Amino acid sequence: MNSSPWPKVEVLIEGYASQKEKDWYASPSTVLISDNGHKIIVDPGANKNQLLEALQSRDLKTEDIDIVFLTHYHLDHIFNLRLFPQATLCDGEALITDEKMSDCSGKIPGTSIQILSTPGHDNKHWSLLVKTEKGIIAIAGDVFWWQDQEEQEITLPLLLEKRDPFVQSESQSESQSESQSESQSESQSESQSESQSESQSELELRKSRQKLLDLADFIIPGHGKMFPVPN
Ligand SMILES: [Zn+2]
């Protein structure tokens, strides 16, 4: 048990992602939070061996993990769920233990860990804020992420504007709606001019990024290294 009154945050696996031909090789940042007697895994990921080794090196068994939190439902983030069949499972909306489902908005019950809705990368996506001795750490899932070969450029404008290849851009959604353009009604042209250069998902992603940059001192991205929030 964690004897310090502060929650402890440890990155068990630093998230990575690379593409070879059409396949992705990826596992997200898997984080262990120890808080108020709970052992919480955030995003168990897809790399079974690395996760089991990281737990073993801390004298932990998979049964010692009592809560698993998921930032979102992409397969590389959830594949290792099968290693924790006994754990309570939590996303930003609900918590499930066996067949009992309870509300889980705002905080992970029994802990000081705050849950924030951070859509954009996926329309259901959550991040965690943990107040630690060293400052507030955001576990951001794929609100921020990099491919292995990309350099992590940590400036506010670049963090806000970095394109997420999994988020549909406006030019992509425009080409999809082109077929409807013959019957362009007034309301349609209005909504098109409102969105201008950004798609709804891109707009939401940017808002989520801004929210975490405003609230956190450090950010653990879905894939990439933890970084301090620039001033
Ligand atoms: Zn991911």
Image (spheres, grey):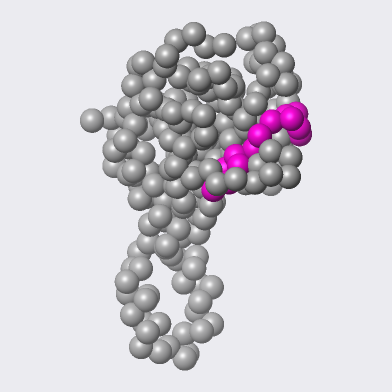
Q: Residue at x 47, y 85 (%)?
A: 181
Residue at 45% from the left image edge and 31% from the top image edge: 113
Counting from the top left corner in percent of width and height, residue 112 is at 44, 28
Q: Which residue lies at the image location 46% right of the left edge and 72% below the top edge?
A: 174
Q: Does residue 127 appear to the left or right of 75 in the view shown? A: left
In the rendered image, the quadrant that contains the C terminus is top left
Given residues 171 and 69, the one toward you in this image is 69
What are the residue bounds of the magenta stretch? 82-95
Location of residue 211 by image quarter: top left
Q: Position of residue 173 (x, y in %)?
A: 49, 68
Image quadrant where one finds the N terminus: top right
Q: Position of residue 125 (x, y in %)?
A: 51, 47
Residue 165 screen position, x and y as percent: 51, 50
> Eyeballing the image, is 231 above or below 209?
above
The answer to whether any part of residue 199 appears in the image is yes
Q: Along the line of sight, which residue is nearer the eye, 161 or 57?
A: 57
Q: Is residue 128 magenta?
A: no
- Tell me, yes or no, if residue 26 can be seen here: no
**Which residue shows up at 37% across the image and 43% down it?**
209
| 17 sits to left or right of 192 | right
